[in-house]
Each structure stands twice: as structure tokens, then as C-alpha cells.
Image: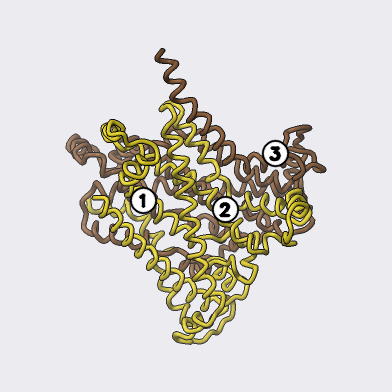
Amino acid sequence: MKAKLNIRKYLLPILLALVFLAIILFPYYYLVLQSFVPWVKVDKTLVPKDLTIKSFSYLFTQSSSTNPYVWARSLLNSFIVSLPTGIISVLVGLFTGYASSKMNFSGKKLIYNLLVFQMFFPTIILLVPRFMIMKDYVNSYVGLILPLCIPIWAIFMYINYFKTIPDTIFEAARIDGASELQNVLLIAMPATKPISVIVFLTSFTTRWTEVIWDMKMASDVHYKTLNVMLTSQFSRTDALPGPMYASAVALTLPIILLFLAFSKYFREGINFMVK
Amino acid sequence: MNLTAWIFNLPYLVYSIIFFFIPVGWAFWLATTDWNLMAEKFNYVGLKNFKKLFSSSSVIKSFWNSYRYMIPIILGCLILGFLIALLVSRLPKKIRGVAAVGFFIPYLVSGTAVAVMVQYVFSYNSTLSNFLRAHFDNVPINILQSETGFWILVAMVVWKMSGYYALFILSGIESISEEVNEAAELDGCTGINKLFRITIPMITPTITNVVTLAAGLSFHIFSEPYLLTGGGPLKKTTTWYLEIYNSAFVSFKAGYSSAMAIACGLQIFLTLRLITFLMDRVNHKFGW
């Protein structure tokens, strides 16, 4: 009886949710489908039939004499640029967040005010001067990675999260002789796991999909990220639709898989962000 | 403890000095010059760049377009986000997480990837264009370069963002205590009534968050018009970011584009301030 009641209660919402989800995900389904259909059928079909990986194999084996495997290379570049950014944001967020919320030092207020100022400062103003500072690093990973490696919001995520962790835990550890470094690595790091996951995922994704900076810093095809590679092929009339769809899938799939893998933590983190 | 704390803050400080504070100063100084990104020489022009902004049609268009984008984007994201959140909140607890992630997927699809699809789907010879021409009159030859183009860009942004904002709204809905819901239902307050009298008033702080985030976002639109419309037709889809990028890196007017960026920053700051002020009044009305 009880089970029956539950089914009746949930049947309608589940059906509605499925229909709605199907509508929302339809564009992405279409995008993925077009990358797997034979080239003559691209943009002309909605049913998965005669699927092939020709678009992908064409794309990732495309080479020129000076630049072997340009697309595969650009996919690799996206990882080379985004992974360090994700890791640096977590580490800097953790240490700066810990220092600004759990340590007493002269200048604490100053750092906090600087952070607030930066948080609300429109970054578009920094575009041209940043480019001038890094002018000698055009076409290098240093030029691509460094200027965007520390998102200020990440530091704030940690500061806010540390507010929910009582100071006494760290005090007790100090009395037991723990150094501040041990406090960060052995107590703060495990305690902030959900936030670290969110910060890593978000800064990785933001970096992965960055356009303006990467477009300016990588004029040489050797350093183009996948996103910029796709952007640069965009208006070319000789670009083949099939491989273009394939590169769009290659651009999105790593991010989606990454988020699905961490979805448990992600929900936790969002719930915290809202509060 | 002093020294250790400063060592912990060191990476952030070094980064901020090089990539934030020096650029900020530089930007304001640049805005008073006519430098072109490459030449050895340049002139100090005072406030001329700023004066020029007021007579530039691109700047005026970007200014108003920010609001033209903002209003449908906020409304679209709120309505769609709310629908998704309400639906997910009715699901059994066990599958809520999975469902929320499902609706979240569009957020993870890069704007460039969607632009590829939109470009092909709306191109002249596409199945959709042929279908539209066969069944309707007055279908523009280049759909993206017509009035519809703007709405396609708005739809792309709303599609991408609403699943993300839905997560915020869902958390808000879930934080309403069971007692409030039960009391409302006992008093016969259900359906639409409950939505407008209980659910929405209970989560106005969350709504405030979403409105502010979506408003901020609408100032940052770049890839979609850059790839699909180039700001056209007649600058109807152009944005600040697009114009700043073009004037800096296409026409090489570094000084002028810095002035533009400062104007853009000012508009963002003032608009978000105004929105926060207005939303605070709404919150106040509902007792928050």
C-alpha cells in the first residue's frame, strides 16, 4: 500500500522531470550526434544510425609538416594550461584562506580589504595592461598560465568555509605543538575537501573555456588551446562540419566527465555556497 | 606567527601586485594616452579618450545592449531555473542529485561548442533554414544577422546558465522547513498559491543572489557575439567585451580601449549596486 502511494506521488514529477530534461539536453544530444554520423548526414539527421568515428579520427590525425597533430596538440594544451590553474587555485586558496581566517598577524585587515577590492573590481580593465606585462611571453605556457592562475573568488570560498570550522580545533593542535604548516596540511586540507573540489572544478573549467586571453597569448598554433583552435577555425568556409562537431565534443566531454566524477562533492559545495 | 602568515600570503600577494595592482594603475594611466600597443612614442591626451566615448556609436550601443541582454537573461534564467528547481525538489531525495547534475550539463558546454552548432543549424542551406523558408514568409537570408540573431544569443546564454542557477534555487527551496510547508498545506495553501505565498517569499535571498549573478554575467558576454554575429546587425548584438577587444587588439587603440574598459567597469559597478539596493528593499518587504 505504502509503495503504491509513493509511486503515485512521484510518478508525475519523475515523468515531468524526464521530459524537461530531454528538452534541455536536446541541443547537446544533437551536437554529440552530429559528430558521430557519416559526413553526408551531418546536420540532416536526428536518429543515431550508421555511427562512425570518422570525424574524430580525421580531426585528431590532422597534421601539417611544421605542426604534427594540431588538434590533438591543442587538446593537450588545454590540459597543460587548465590543470596547473586548478591546482594553484586550490593551494593558494587554502593557504591564503587559512592565514586570513585562522591566524593572527599584523596586516590581516589590510589583506582582507585588498581581497574585497579585487573581488569586486571588473577584470576587463586589466586586459590590456596584463597583455603588456606579458608581451614577451606571447606563445609560451608561462604567458598562458600565470596571469589567470589565481581566481580571487576561490580565496573567498575558503575564507567563508573556514568560518564554519571552529578556531579551537587549530588552537588545540597548536598547544599540542603542531606548526602552522601542519595545521594547514593535516587539519585544514582534509576539512575543506568539498570546497577544494568545487574550486578545482570551477577554476579548471573557467580556464578551459577562456577565450580572450588565450586568443591573444597564443598566436602560434603550437600553443593554441582547443577552445582557441576551434575559435580560429570558425569563420573558415573550408572547415568541415563533421570534424567541427567532433572538436566541439572534444571540448566539452572532459569537463562533463570531470563533473560527473565529482558530482557528490559538487552538490555539497553548492549547498555551502548558497548559505 | 606573523612571519608564517605572511609567507602563506606571499604567493597571493606577489600575484596580485604583478597581475592586479600594477595593471590597475597602468590601465588608468594608459587611458590618458593615445598609445597603439606597439609604437615607441605616444602622446598624453588627458581626458580626450573619455570624451570620445560619448560620441562613439559602439560605446553607446554597448551601454544600452548591456541592459537589453540583462533583462531577458535575468528573467529567462529565473523562470527556467525556478521550473527546474521546483521539478527536482518534487523528486524522491535519492535521485535529486543525479537529476540536478543532468540539468547542470548545459553549464559545462563551452560557448564555443554551442556556437559551432548554432552556426550550422542556422546557416543558409541547413535543414532548419530550408524548413523555415518552406513554411513561413519573410525568413531572413542570414538568420543570425537579423533581429532574431539577438534572441538566439540570449537563448544560448539562458540555456547555458539556468541549470546552474537552478542549483541555487533548489538549495533555497530545500532549506524551507517541513513545518512551514505542512502548516501551509493544512491551511489549504497549495499549488500556485503556495508557490507565490510561501515558496517565493521564503527564498528571496536566494533569488537576490541569482539576479545579481545573472546581471553580472550579462556584462561579460563575448564568445557568442564574437563568433556568431560579430556584433551585428548594426551593432545590435555587440557587447562591451567585444568592443573593448576589437578596439585594443584589432584597431590597436590601447589607450582608447582602456578608457572604454573603465567606462564598462563603472557601469557594471553602478548597475550591480542599484540591483542590490532594489533587491534589498524586496527582501526587506518579505521580512529578511
Residue type for callout 2: Ala
Residue furthest out toward the left: A175
Residue furthest out toward the top: A1
Residue type for callout 3: Leu
Between B100 and A263, which is closer to the camera in this rendering?
B100
**Spot occupied by residue B235 in the image (x, y as percentages of width and height):** 60, 70
**Spot occupied by residue A59 in the image (x, y as percentages of width and height):** 74, 45
Colour yellow maps to chain: B
In terms of secondary structure, where does tag 3 sit?
A: helix
- In the image, which is nearer the foreground, mark 1 or mark 3? 3
Distance between mark 1 and mark 3 Cα atoms:
39 Å
The image's mark for residue B155 is 2
Local crowd size for mark 3, using a 10 Å CA cut-off: few (<14), some (14–19), many (≥20): many
Residue type for callout 1: Ile
Between B177 and B132, which is closer to the camera in this rendering?
B132
The subunit carrying tag 2 is B
- In the image, which is nearer the foreground, mark 3 or mark 2? 2
Q: Quadrant of residue A272?
A: top left
Quadrant for the N terminus of chain A in the image? top left
Report whether residue B288 is seen.
no
Q: Are marks 3 and 2 in contact (CB under 8 Å)?
A: no
Q: Earlier in the sequence, mark 1 or mark 3?
A: 3
- In the image, which is nearer the foreground, mark 2 or mark 1? 2
**Spot occupied by residue B142 in the image (x, y as percentages of width and height):** 72, 61
Shown colour of chain A: brown
Q: Please give the residue where the numbered disc 1 appears in the rendered image.
A: A155
Q: Please give the residue where the numbered disc 3 appears in the rendered image.
A: A33
In terms of secondary structure, where does tag 1 sit?
A: helix
